[in-house]
């Protein structure tokens, strides 16, 4: 799936100046936000961010992101892991 965002010109220009890092950085921020809001379990959020689960976990710890991990998230992580076997 592809998503298009409308950004103010000054922000768009800044992102264009560092294209190589812009998309991975935005994906990481999206993954952190979705995880923080309880909308995505950590395994899926790490995948969205393009990194391993423990690397993502380390970033959450460094940023002091509270880590809500509900029963539903555990179940989704298990289903996701089984689908990748």
Image (cartoon, rainbow, N blue to C red):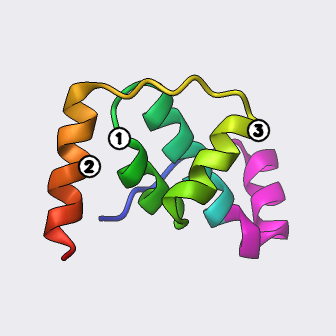
Q: Earlier in the sequence, mark 3 or mark 2?
A: 3
Counting other residues with Cα less than 10 Å from the Cα at mark 2, is it few (<14), some (14-19), or many (20 or more)?
Answer: some
Label 2 close to label 1 by CB (< 8 Å): yes
User: Where are the magenta residues, as a range?
Assistant: 8-22
The residue carrying mark 3 is 62
In the picture shown, does residue 80 fall above or below 5?
below
How far apart are the two marked residues, 3 and 2, measured between alpha carbons?
23 Å
Quadrant for residue 70, please give it: top left
Q: Is residue 14 magenta?
A: yes
Q: Which residue is mark 1?
A: 41
Please name the residue that numbered disc 2 is placed on: 77
Instruction: Give the overall secondary structure of the magenta segment.
Output: helix
Q: Is residue 23 above or below residue 31?
A: below
Magenta stretch: includes residue 63: no
Q: Residue 3: horizontal and vertical position, in percent?
A: 39, 56
Could you say where residue 13 lies in the image, as x and y percent from the top left? Answer: 80, 58
């Amino acid at each position: 799936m592809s998503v298009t965002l409308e950004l103010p010109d000054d922000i768009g220009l800044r992102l264009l100046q560092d294209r190589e890092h812009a998309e991975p950085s935005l994906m990481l921020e999206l993954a952190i936000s979705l995880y923080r809001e309880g909308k995505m379990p950590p395994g899926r959020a790490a995948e969205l961010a393009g990194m391993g689960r423990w690397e993502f976990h380390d970033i959450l710890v460094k940023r002091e992101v509270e880590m809500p991990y509900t029963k539903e998230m555990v179940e989704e992580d298990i289903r996701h892991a089984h689908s990748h076997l």
